[in-house]
Amino acid sequence: MEKVLEFNHVSLIWPDFKIDDVTFYLEKGYIMGLVGYNGAGKTTLFRIMENRYRNYTGEILIDGYDCRTQEARVKDITAFISDDQNFFFEESIKRNAEIYSPYYSRWDWDSFYKYLDLFEISDKTKVKNLSRGTFLKFQLAFAVAHHPVLYAMDEPSAGFDPVFRYDFLRIVQNIVAEDNASVLFSTHNTSDLDKIADYITMLDNGRVLFCKDVETLRDEYRLKSDKNERFRISMLFEKGRWN
Amino acid sequence: MDLRTYIKLDKYYKKSLESYYPRNLCIGAVGMFLFCVFVVAGAFGMMDRIYVFYIYAICFLAATSLYFWPLIEVRENIFTVSLFKKFRNAPVNKKLFARAKLILLIRFSVLFYLPVQIMHFVGLNRTDTPQLSITGFWPWLLC
């Protein structure tokens, strides 16, 4: 068992919110869904991984590298995909790739252009002119190009149209299969996770309620439920059932 | 990647930015210097005053900051954003990244300072201003 992502007793306390002793891990080649109500701490966990908040206790390891002390190495092997990623918005997609690519040890122009073509994005377009969905597609192409071992995606599918959302999930599965990468995926569209997630981690008020594989959740649901209903991840949000 | 590579990437980055034209800015800075010293100071008869030194110092600072600004800030619409923020999720060694910029600033300062000194000797040699000496800046320390 090769762990790609490990949260070990991560805590971060603010006056009005806290991340409380978060511990879970993700193995290589799997997709983990991070779910929870608004304000549960999902985005905060991503930001901690990005080192935007550094004053946490505990440790986060990505492929064995510490997020805090080996930041450059961690960022070389991790792709962060979210709405608030920083690029050179006044520059074209191509220029952005040219600026950032020398810093990545495994940058692959062929993959970058393959995915830009797949998403039908012109490399001459300025990043500031991309719509939210296209911006996320560009980020995915950019991420694939540097062959990360972990994709950390915060609400990636929220900006996609229904047709592309289906394609996007297929692409994520392909990436996992081809590159043997892992994906940490937060979303409120739990139907996306029904299709692709291997593990589910549920957060509530900054705490991990559980981190289980989908098969186990399915079995537990079957034992608890008297209805003959197919298990869906949205059922986890029925208050009280899983606490 | 070593420091040399970071410096090379910084130079490459600056040269290729569409929103920034280093050559124009440098020409502008030198032009501003000449304008201030030879036209403004000369026309107003301030050649022998301490103002000349102030103009000299301001031009130097303006030119270096014009050069340095794109290495730490990037323009976005009417605002500027820190370049460090732009590279937040890129795999950069922050210490080398910052050090490369500092080296470029020092290099530019020296390269800008030397022609300015030559101009000083050619154009302002006859001034009696004690602040404009062979040492250029900080003359009271070195004379």
Image (cartoon, rainbow, N blue to C red):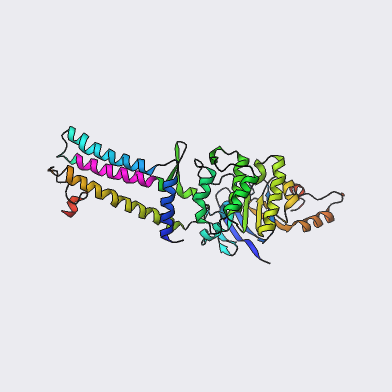
> Which residue is the extreme one toward the bottom?
A1
Q: Does the magenta-highlighted stretch encompass residue A71?
A: no
What residue do we see at 20% from left, 39% from top?
B51
Q: Position of residue A205 (x, y in %)?
A: 64, 50
User: Which span of residues is magenta-colored?
Assistant: B51-69
Q: Position of residue A13 (x, y in %)?
A: 56, 53
- Name the one closer to the observer, A159 or A112: A112
Q: Position of residue A201 (x, y in %)?
A: 69, 55
What residue do we see at 25% from left, 50% from top?
B114
Residue A18 in view: no
Give left or right: position of A63 versus A33. left
Q: Position of residue A192 (x, y in %)?
A: 72, 47
Query: Which quadrant of the rendered structure holds the N terminus of chain A?
Result: bottom right
What residue do we see at 78% from left, 58% from top?
A216
Give left or right: position of B37 versus A148. left
Give left or right: position of B111 versus B19. left
Q: Relative to residue A43, is residue B46 depicted above or below?
A: above
Q: Relative to residue A51, is residue A94 depicted above or below?
A: above
- Name the one closer to the observer, B45 or A19: B45
Q: Does the magenta-highlighted stretch encompass residue B62?
A: yes
Residue A153 in view: yes
Q: Main secondary structure of the magenta part?
A: helix
> Which residue is the extreme one toward the top?
B43
Residue B97 lies in what quarter of the image? bottom left
